[in-house]
Amino acid sequence: MDKPQSCDVLVVGAGLAGLNAAAEIREKQPGMRVLVVDAGGCASTEVMGFSAPVNPPDSPDMLYFDILRAGGGYSAAALARVLADRSLPELRRLERMGLVFDRCADGSYDMVNALGSSHPRVVHQATTTGRQAMELLATAVTPLRVSKLLLADGRIAGVLTDAGEAIAAKAVVLAGGGFAGLWQFSTWSKTLCGDCLCLAQDAGAELIDLGFVQFEPTVTVYPEALRGFSVLTAVLNEGARLLNCQGESILPAAGPLPRKSDLARIIMREIEAGNACAHGGIRFDYTQVDEAAFARKYPAYHAKYRRFAPSLAELGQEVVPAAHTTLGGIRVTPDCATAVPGLFAAGEAMGGLHGADRVGGNAGLEVFVFGRIAGASAAAYAARSSQARLPRALPTPLRTPDDVYGRMAEILQRGFTPLRKIADLERAAQELAGLGAYGPVMLATAAVADALSKERARAPYQLDHAAVVDVPALPEGQQPGDDFLAPVWQRAASLRIDRVARTDFYPPHFPLASCRLFYDDDWLYLNYEVTDRYVQCLSTEFGQMVFRDSCVEFFAEPLPGLGYINFEFNCGGNLHVAHIRDCTLVPGGFKDHRVFREDELSGIEIVHSLPRRVSPEITTPVTWHVLVRIPIAFFEKALGRPLRPLAGTQWRANFNKCASGCSHPHWLTWSQLLERNMHRPQDFGIVRFV
């Protein structure tokens, strides 16, 4: 077809995000001229299913919790809320369109239990959900590559193609995927090289969290004919095992599976320790998998595997991590708008939704939800906007040479791995600097720099698992009083309590817990916020075991060698405080510790949002707060040492959420534990008073 010279909205990308955007534009504005362009290749056909929290006790709230927990404090809560709230309406909409999902004999959805989910919630049509949805949304696609966004007076005027031709457009939707294709060993097409992010950055849009790259933990390296083929991690919940060269499982025998990012690191460490199997990977073992059930649930996978072995147990499959999803991208508002008027983004091209890690099934949901939102927003913008004048002088498109792509792929493969080692990232940054000012090179350089800055923040403490937080001084004259939601708290340090401390409680339950912090010359201020659906408080008298209730904790070691102070606060405001000098467990408690008397704690001020007693247990989602003010003098008296001024000093500490006596017990921490013991000071994080 002849190349069009103008349109109302131009959509870059013909995957599910782009097709959903185009469909929404045509639905909202039937007469609007929409042009979908694509240079070839997308990840959407590989979408197995998507998150749909339809089966109680799962809910959109639980999906929201899972997104923020996996994101490690980096997820944009507003985007996460939109995705969760629109999950079930999106499921119903797709069913009305004609997409059919697999169901169990009783008529319920056949859910896949994806990594990172608190409940099985991925609906699917065998393993071809994405392909089926692409067929339902099929539209005309113009095969061309956009090399530059054209602006007039700071707003979108159109695009420049790689052939040097201009196409006028009132609005542009960038939905062309991420940049995992830049790695040498990747799960996706080499066409997914971050073109949309380069276009956005060149036009003045902001990119966010490029250093967050999710590596698919289990990508085949053997059999050779399956090299690069992703293995379904969900099968690890169905009997499959990961075995090293000694035939030992590298994962715990019980409890929830690690998130994908953690699983990728576990596999990489096992390989680096010299425990790889014959072909350089870790064996994905199917001997305990019900093959008939596997064939029914994953027919395409089963058929593919049977070409290379008479049974799953004899496949001999080995896997390693591979670059899979880039979680950072173009910063957008909840309506998918960027900082450039007329420019919108959706799908993997947008950043901020997932944060540091992504829950399985959410990428599939994201392309539907935000593709639709981007289309609606672009249509509304184009309907109220005039066409901006294209620039008279068009720039010459700059093409990245193939040899630069090849060299960049080698650098990223070697230097940017799931382990994110500082020395490797530094070497990668140096090598990328010599490749020239091409868009993809600048994108890769920014991703390495972002990853490097986050890793360097932890380096001085030589604790690659420890968390670090910078706590600001309370602004003068802005006491929050007893107001949990006072505006000043938005300026406080904020941390997530989302690391699983114990896995012996099963099935897992993970509330959403966080804490905000300030300090001044006399006080340490802690503002805990917890959202949970199982809350109780029975310990109302001093001396009772508050950790059995819905409870938050603060372990603080202001100075090395003097032990730490253990603070526990239940949701009703009761507290337990002890000075633990030796946390070795002995009958009756710790080897050396002292519990403070009630009169010694009179200076600690506690404000709580729930009643003193919560019984019977609350079993619907509820958000509760505990605001604590601890005198610095309390720490000084307990330790017998001066601690002030705090500015410029640092403490070791951890923040915990527990509820061992509730119907859904759990133990979560802020700083990662290397052993199943919350009382190990060597696992505490770093609190820096700035």
Image (cartoon, rainbow, N blue to C red):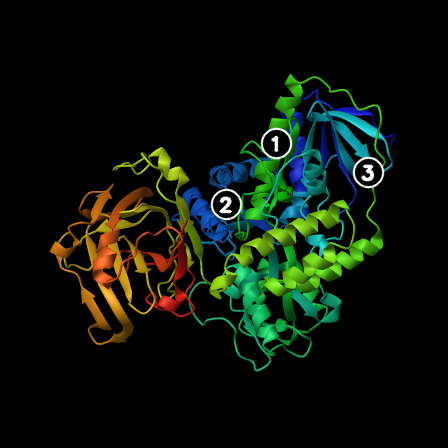
User: Disc number at residue 369?
Assistant: none
Viewed as shown, does residue 292 lie left or right of 80?
right
Residue extending farthest bottom: 246
| Disc 1 residue crowd, few under 14, some 14–19, many 20+, Cα 10 Å | some
Q: Residue 407, relative to residue 351: is it above or below?
A: below
Viewed as shown, does residue 189 lie left or right of 285?
right
Q: Between disc 2 and disc 3, whose residue precedes? A: 2
* Separation of residues labelled 1 and 3 (CA atoms): 25 Å
Q: Position of residue 199 (x, y in %)?
A: 72, 38
* Separation of residues labelled 2 and 3 (CA atoms): 33 Å
Q: Nearer the viewer, mark 1 or mark 3?
A: 1
| Disc 3 residue crowd, few under 14, some 14–19, many 20+, Cα 10 Å | some
Pointer 1 residue = 339
Q: What SS does tag 2 mark? A: loop
Q: What SS does tag 1 mark? A: loop
Rendering quarter of residue 353: top right
Pointer 3 residue = 144
User: Disc number at residue 75?
Assistant: 2
